[in-house]
Image: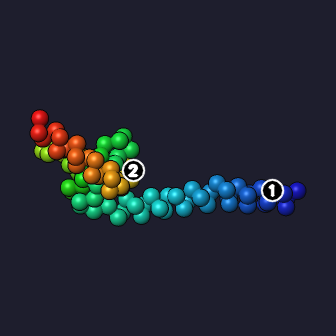
Amino acid sequence: MLVYMLALFAIFYIFLIHPHRKQQKERKRFLESLKKGDKVATIGGICGQITNLDDDIVTLQVADGLELQVLRSGIHRYLEQEEAAKMKELWNKRKRR
């Protein structure tokens, strides 16, 4: 009976706990690696370029003359080059109006 309980715990650890810890470490590394000039997307879908970093606050330039402050934990991912180019193109279209 004890062997079955240990086996169940081992399976539980392998499939649930270990992957979650690994994901947490990767997320922490990502958030610590953010720097000025990075183009990122937030969890809410706002895209912008990092202009300032504090301990917990990131300032994003989302348009010319418009900056937003978001929590560092709210940054979801880096923007791919194609996405960043598309974002820049949209900014330029808005400037022409």
Q: Quadrant of residue 68?
A: top left
Q: Residue at x 38, y 44 (%)?
A: 43
Q: Position of residue 75 (x, y in %)?
A: 35, 50
Mark 1, other Cα within 10 Å: few <14 / some 14–19 / many ≥20: few
Give the vertical position of 23 relative to 46 (above or below). below
**What residue sits 79% from the left and 60% below the top?**
7
Q: Amino acid at mark 1?
A: Met
Which residue shows up at 52% across the image and 58% down it?
Answer: 23
Asked if residue 12 lies left or right of residue 18, the reply is right
Does residue 73 appear in this view?
Answer: no
Q: Position of residue 12 (x, y in %)?
A: 70, 55
Q: Which residue, as the protein is rendered here, is positioned at the far right?
A: 1
Q: Quadrant of the N terminus?
A: bottom right
Q: Is residue 28 visible?
A: yes
Residue at the extreme top: 97
Instruction: Please tell me whether mark 2 sits on a helix, a strand or a loop.
Output: strand
Q: Who is closer to the viewer here, 68 or 46?
A: 46
Q: Nearer the viewer, mark 1 or mark 2?
A: 2
Disc 1 from disc 2: Cα separation: 38 Å
Q: Which residue is mark 1?
A: 5
Percent coordinates x, y for residue 38 in the rendering: 28, 59
Q: Are marks 1 and 2 in contact (CB under 8 Å)?
A: no
Marks 1 and 2, the one that precedes in the sequence: 1
Give 70 or 60, whichever is nearer the viewer.
60
- The amino acid type found where label 2 is placed reads His
Label 1: which secondary element: helix
Task: Kindly identify which residue carries mark 2.
Answer: 76
